[in-house]
Image (tube, grey):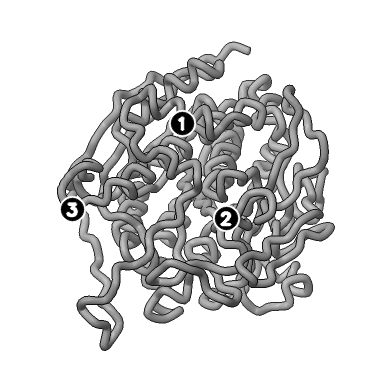
Amino acid sequence: MTFRVRSAVRPMTLLAGVALAVTAVAAPAGAATNAPAPALHHFSAAAKSFIGARTVADRVAKLDAAMSALPRESVAYNATKLWNQGITGAGATVTTLVSFGDDQVKQVLDEYSQRHGLPPANVEVLQPSGSVPACTDPGVDTATCESWGGETDLDVTMMHAMAPNAKIIVAATPVAETQGFTGLPEMMNAVDYLTKHKLTDVISMSFGTTEENFPSFQSIKTLDPALERASKAGITMVASSGDDGPTGGFLQGPGNYPYRVASWPASDPRVTTLGGTQLHLDSTGTRTKPDDLVNVADNGFGEGAGLSKAYARPAWQDSVKKITGSKMRSFPDISMEGVQGTSQSAPLFAGVLALAVQANHGKLGQINPALYEKLGPKGAKAGIVDVTTGDNSQDGVEGFTATPGFDIASGWGTVDASVFVPALVKALR
C-alpha cells in the first residue's frame, strides 16, 4: 500500500536543561549513607544486545535480529486492515519515556523502515529533565546507558510498525531508572513537561520497580500527581507489567523476592498495563495456533502479573472482583506480544492507541473504564482475543494462570486492532 504522510517530518530536537524542578526524595530514616547502589533496570536480552553497538548500521542490525517477526506482527494484529482504511496514526503523537535515550534514533528507525517497507519516521527527541550525558561520559555506566539506547530503538520501532504515520517523541531523562525511587522523579518531571506543553496523546513506559523497594507503599503515591495531571489532560498512559513473573527484583540485587510482589507503575490505576503473550505465526503473519502467555520454559522469563499492595481496586475493576478475589488493583489489563519482554508489549499497544487517536480525532484519555465495563465483556465483538493458555510462575514463586475470559495473568487477553480500535472509539463517546 502507499503511505501518505500528512505532516512534514520535523528535525530531531534536543531540549537540554529545561528549567523544571525535580523533586528529591529523602532516604528512609536510618538508611546508611554507604548502602549498596539500587539494582539496575531489568533489561530484556534484546535491549542488552545493543551494548557496544554504536553506529547506525550496528544498531539496525541489532533491531533486525531482535525484531525478526515484527513486520508480521502488524498483520497478525490486523493493523494493516486499518491502514487500508486510511487509519495509520496520522495526526497522533505517541511518546516513549526512557532513561538516556538514543541520539541516533531517527537514523536507526529510518534505515530499519526502509528495509521493511515502512515510511520514514517522524521522530523528535526531548530532554525535559535536563541534559542527557553521553554513554561514554565520566561517571556514566556505559553498559546501562547503551542498553537504554537499545530499549529506545526497540520502543520506537514497535510504535512505528503499528502506527507508521504517527509522530513519535523520545522523552529522555539524564538519570538511570533503577529499583526504588532512583530515576523516577526525573521521569515524572518529563511527564509533567509533556502535559504542560500539550505534546503527546499517549505515553509508553517500559520500566518498573518492585513496590516493596520503596520506603513504604504509601510513599509510592508521591509519584502519582504527574500521572494524575497527565490523565486529566487526556493523555493515555501504558506501562509494561514486568518480566519477573509474579515476583520482582530486590532493591539491592541480584535476585528476586521469594513471594508474590507487584511492580510500579504497572500497579498504578492511572495506567493501562500490558502483559506479555507469544504469537505463533507462519511466514505470512497468520497464526498457527492461539496466543499463550510468555513463560520461563520458552523465554527464560515470565510476564509480570499480580495484585498491588499499594493501590486499592479501582471501581472499574469491580466487575472482575470475584475473579481476582482481592480488594486491590490487579494487572495486567490486556496483553500483546512480549517475547522480547513486556517492554515490547507496551509500545506495541501504544501504537494501537495511536491508531485510535486518529480514528477518534483527538485524545482518548483514561481507557480502563471502557475496557472493563464495555469492551472486555463483549469479547471478540469488541476486538478482544481471549488468551487461555499458560501461567507466569517463576523463580519458585507460584504465578497466575490464563483461563477463559478475564484473568489476572493476561487481563482481558489480547487484541484484534481492526475491531478493537473502532470499538474503543465508540465506547469512549
Q: Quadrant of residue 42?
A: bottom left
- Whole-number angstrom distance, CA of label 3 to CA of label 1: 26 Å
Q: Could you say whether the residue bearing mark 1 is in a helix, strand or loop? A: helix
Figure quadrant of residue 12: top left
First in sequence, mark 3 or 1: give its number. Answer: 1
Of callouts 1 and 2, the N-terminal one: 1
Instruction: Examine the rendered structure and indicate whether residue 406 appears above or below residue 347.
Output: below
> Which callout, 2 or 3, points at the residue further toward the start of the chain?
3
> How many discs mark residues in the rendered view?
3
Indicate which label's residue lies in the foreground, 2 or 3: 3
Quadrant including the N terminus? top right
Identify which amino acid the numbered label 2 is placed on.
Thr
Q: Give the CA distance from mark 2 to mark 3.
A: 35 Å
Left or right of 171 on screen, residue 166: right
Q: CA distance from mark 1 to mark 2?
A: 29 Å
Q: Residue at x 31, y 55 (%)?
A: 176
Residue sitting nearer the eye, 196 or 209: 209
